[in-house]
Amino acid sequence: MTNVERRTIRVDGELWERVGEVARQLRTTRSEMIRSYLLWLVGTPGARPPSRPALDNVDSGQGS
C-alpha cells in the first residue's frame, strides 16, 4: 500500500480489547484485520474478509 496515513476511529474500550484478543488468536493485528475488512468491503479484487476464530473461543462480551 502506498500513501498510508494514520486514521483515528472511535471504538468502545471493551470491544477494542475483545478485538485485540481475536487478533492475538489469529496471530495478526487489529490494524491488519481492519484493513482486510475495508478492502473486502469496497470490493478490491482478490480481497477477502478477515478470518475469525471459532465462536466458542471468543468472549461474546455478553456475560454468562
Image (cartoon, rainbow, N blue to C red):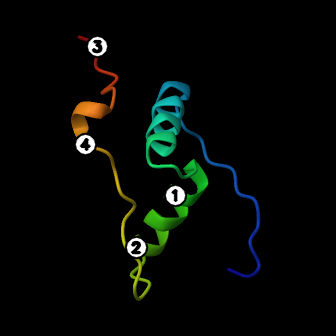
In the image, residue 43 sits, relative to residue 18, either above or below, namely below
Pick whichever, 49 or 12, lies toward us.
49
Q: Which mark is residue 40?
A: 2
55 left or right of 14? Answer: left
What amino acid type is highlighted by mark number 3? Gly
Q: Name the residue beneath numbered marker 1.
A: 34
User: In the image, residue 12 lies at what x, y percent?
Assistant: 52, 30
| Whole-number angstrom distance, CA of label 3 to CA of label 4 | 18 Å
> Relative to 53, is 15 above or below?
above
Q: Which disc is residue 54 wearing?
A: 4
Instruction: Find the distance from the CA under tag 2 to the CA under tag 1.
Output: 10 Å
Q: Which of label 1 and label 4 is nearer to you?
A: 4
Q: Earlier in the sequence, mark 1 or mark 4?
A: 1
**Nearer to us in this view, 7 or 58:** 58
Give the mark nearest the N terminus, 2 or 4: 2
**Residue at x 56% of width, y 59% of height:** 32
Cα–Cα span, label 2 and label 4: 21 Å
Mark 3 element type: loop
Q: Residue furthest bottom?
A: 45
Q: Mark 1 and mark 4 in contact? Answer it, CB < 8 Å.
A: no
**SS type, badge 4:** loop
Q: Amino acid at mark 2?
A: Trp
What residue is disc 3 on?
Answer: 63
